[in-house]
Amino acid sequence: MPLSLTGIIRIFESDVEFDVEIKPVFNYGLINPGIDVVENGIVFKNPQSNEGVELLVQGNYEIEDGYKIHIRPGKGYLYLLHSKDLRYGLFSRKGFVYSQPYDALNKTLNYWRSQILRTRKVSFLEELYNVSLLIILGLTYLPSGGLVAAPTTSLPEIVGGDRNWDYRYVWVRDASYGAEALIKAGLFTKARGVLRFLSSVVDPSSKSFDHPLYTVDGTMPPAEEELTWLKGHKLSKPVRIGNAAYLQVQTDVEGAFMDSLYQYMKATGQKEYVEDIWWIIESIAEWVMKSWETKSTDIWEQRGVLEHFVHSKVMNWVALDRASKMAEELGHNFKEWRDEAQKIKEDVMNNGVTSGHFSRYYGSEDVDAALLTLPIYGFIDAKHNIFKNTFKKILDDLVVEKDLLLRYRSDFMGEVAHPFTLTSTWLARVYIRMGMMEDAKRVLLNLASCSTDLYLIAEHVDASLCDPRGNYPQLFPHAGVVSAITELEEINGYSS
């Protein structure tokens, strides 16, 4: 997959004959292409526009029909390129500017290897760590810095079910987690690119982030639609494009961004960068000051459910706590932010604790896995009795097997079936804060064992089969893996 090119190059060397079938369609399968067989390949045209997909072939081959190519033994390549306008495609007059396949392979490999060489080195689960960083970088749209949650849509959480969502967008929360991982890995320039994208969509005249998610160019996301003509992965309907979460008011996302920005300033010492976007810190702090007492949607984006979610309240605390710390570092006096953060903390301790443990939302007896983040963000010590009680209840209620956890037991769509992989990385990070390094190591090893052969991790996993479920690969767990491994290696005297 060459950089900055909407194409795929497949180099082959074979002692046997084989067939290649290529059947592109447009508009999610609604439009079949017109087909032109040309010298050295095939052009698939969208009959409604100048859009097309071109196939350039080199080697000993025969085009048997418009979709099928017979390849004889030998060497060669297949070069597939999508163009918005075929007038500047592979077979156009400017086709000579595009990648030379054999050169492209080496240059592409060298580029990605150079990225990994620049990262902080680890010894524990090194390959998973490196792959996770490559996934984060690969999910980043370089022209804007937008970091998408996943490259896929409608891969089902439950095969045959309807929990099928489109994650091909930049979620403020998810991208902030990705920026945190890049910071911890020492890729500060890449992290700054993500933070710059998130900064560019802040609105100082309204809620700081008007939407929980954005397109990769920073515009409003499209409305959610169901593509009724598609069968879905393993007959899992409906297939969706767009995501209706853009209608939600999620009050935790500002805290996720502020924490990553604060971590960036601490790690790099680049106070001048933070000073330059001081208006963003003020805007977010002012919004949180006015809004934290309201009910909201939670991190899990339940549709039509508004509560005083404890995790969301804590993230409001995070937003003001980090804002006040950055203000102090920069010599600004915003005592009211510290005071309001303290009010939020008191409110959570007074209303978010049930039967001696933190609850999912005010008045609930249940827990959710997001409560694991409380000591990660420094809201409470991991060894505090209330959190220890919470931790025990999470282990009792949500762990399925192999240290894999459900997000919660049920939601607006009913019972949940499969663990959410991000939560295992939270579990490992809590164990680290409890001083239980071998437990943290075991959790990460179990998660690695339920990745694919290439160390790719999906949003969910079928614990009994270790099969990926949901959109894949997912930013959340790979960012969590990087953060957990770097924290594990920071512990003095720890050896993998």
Image (spheres, grey):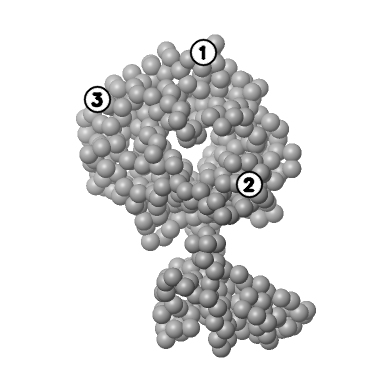
The percent coordinates of residue 232 (x first, y second) are: 61, 51
Marks 2, 1: nearer the viewer: 2
The percent coordinates of residue 161 (x first, y second) are: 63, 41
The vertical placement of 110 against 211, above or below, is below
The vertical placement of 92 against 456, above or below, is below
**Gap between marks 2 and 1, in whole Å?**
38 Å
- The amino acid type found where label 3 is placed reads Lys
Q: Residue at x 42, y 22 (%)?
A: 308
- Where residue 335 is drawn, which disc sits there? 3
Circles 2 and 3 in contact, beta carbons < 8 Å: no
Circles 2 and 1 in contact, beta carbons < 8 Å: no
- Where residue 100 is drawn, which disc sits there? none
| Circle 2 residue | 236
- Classify residue 495 as left or right of residue 340: right
- The amino acid type found where label 2 is placed reads Ser
Quarter occupied by residue 172:
top left
- Where residue 354 is drawn, which disc sits there? 1
Quarter occupied by residue 388:
top right
Q: Residue at x 34, y 52 (%)?
A: 219
Element carrying mark 1 = strand
The percent coordinates of residue 222 (x first, y second) are: 40, 50
